[in-house]
Amino acid sequence: MAGNVWIVAEQWKGAVSDATYELLALGRGLADSLGVRLEAVLLGHGARGLAESLGPADAVLYVDHPTLADATGLQASRAVAALAATRQPRAILVPSTNVSWDLLGLLPARLGVPLINFCREVQVVDGALQVRSLLYGGKMTVTVAAGAGPVVLAILPGTVTAAARGVAPAAVDDVSVDLPDDPGVRLIEYEEPEAGDVDITQQDVLVAVGRGISSESNLEVAEDLATALGGAVCGSRPVIDQGWLPLGRQVGKSGVTVKPRLYVAAGISGAPEHLEGMKDAELIIAVNTDAGAPIFSVAHYGIVDDATDVLEAMAAAVRKRKG
Amino acid sequence: MRILVLMKMVPDIVEELEVAGDGTSLDREYLRFIVNERDDYALEQALLLKDRLQATVTVVAPAAPEVDDILNTALAKGVDRVIRVSGIPATSGARATASALAATLPGIPGALPADLVLSGCQAIDDLDGFTAPILATALGLPYLGLVSRITVDPGAGKAIVGKEYPAGVTGRFEVVLPAFLGVQGCEKPPRYVPVAKVRAAMASGRIEEVAAVSGPSVPPLDVTAMGKPQETGHAEMLGGSVRDVAERVADILAARGLL
């Protein structure tokens, strides 16, 4: 039936991802408000069993093909576009994650429809979809009327409470699409990050540094505070890109998600890609020279000042208390 | 081997952003523009391949404020050609920009076909799509995004490409050339180039100008409002001298058993 709401189920390391259950919860609400069905598209090879946990959907459309076993975005976009061309969904929800990144870039291009990116909120207003998105590194929000569709929505992770896992859907429909056997892009292997460095996901205290620490030499100040607190130093993307910290220390979309007891964010503006990796820390203290930095929206305490100066003073104050 | 790099300018978000009078777009009057950070990494990837494989590198960028600085910097870093495409408004959006570039690039002598087309895989103003995958689709090229490592075997007509996944995992892919890669990072940060070299490039007047060819019309998204985020939560701000603030933080940490 045309006009349904779709979500594309995402797999990572053989399991349905957390982001998928967030999409199912969001999609369920939208479908109910619009009075249409919620359908989940699952791609894979020998992965039909995963459909049994996508319960909030009214139906799962399962496409099995050898080239979808480790589907590239290129091949996944061909499969979803082929299905959408005949079934005409109103909206296709895709997680805005590294795993689904190429799919959400290629799918709208293949369908000739717009993507609405960085979606933080989607609701039905007067029978139409209305989207609120974050732009410019989270410094602006825009409201977009999605029209009658079809449209692809890139949903930021962590913006919706996930649906329950393990509930079976009413139906699983096996559907086939024609796909090329040689898609032009082929996965050789996944490489795990080098072991041996600190596992920042296991730390109670993290001192995170961003572009605002200005130079590599200022890392020493962050290390000093981390040592005083018995924690470790980590960073946002720009610091990793500069090679100041190894990839294993990156927090956010391409890095890891952390939930320490204390997260000190120094010189980090708080782009959505970073926030999704640390916003659930128990206590967040942010230091930034920009009072309008998005990091202050998730921090519990904020300080508008030079990050290096504040870290230095904090290390001294902590040491004084500890004697 | 021939490499085409696409770059674009974006608003510098270190500056204060203001909403224009229409209530739906950025006030551009006092806006500063900088190169899209991911495009800078795409350029660095191209320069690394040029160093290794004696590749020819051409950079194309839509005309925009300060874009000449970027093109001259690219020349100073060693690219072979730089081309400014006029007639694509900076406010076009990713879909319309990709549509215009798809119509324009094939008409630029020597730009296409290229063995590799590289561009940043995202930008902070990509509301209606990502330019790179849309353009790759329009050009009929295989696409892989979030790329941070590229090695090319020209004899085999293939590239081995590293793509970023969560938790520091890298996917190693084989990509058949010609292909379009959306770049996220690089083995090394973008290289530094002395100002004197940029000035010399500027003096050389080597920026070529090409007028955009209209592509299929793409309707813009219906943006009904723009504003600063109204957050449900906000930090309790600690003011005073750095020393006072540090003492208060220590109090907070002690109260929570973190000291």
Image: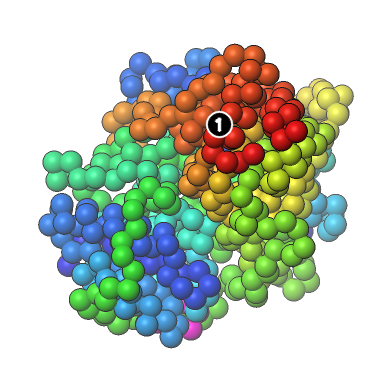
Residue A161 screen position, x and y as percent: 33, 53
Q: What stretch is highlighted in magenta?
A: A63-68
Question: Quarter holding the N terminus of chain A?
Answer: bottom left
Residue A108 screen position, x and y as percent: 39, 55
The residue drawn where x is 24% and y is 74% is: A169
The residue drawn where x is 33% and y is 39% is: A132
Q: In front: A110, or B101?
A: A110
Residue A142 as seen in the image, left or right of residue B18? left
Residue A224 as seen in the image, left or right of residue B132? right
Is residue A192 located in the magenta-colored stretch of the structure?
no
Residue A141 screen position, x and y as percent: 39, 32
> What residue is pinned by disc 1?
B252
Q: Can residue A3 be seen in this view?
A: no
Colouring method of the image: rainbow
Secondary structure of the residue carrying tag 1 is: helix
The residue drawn where x is 71% and y is 67% is: B160
User: What chain does mark 1 sit on?
Assistant: B
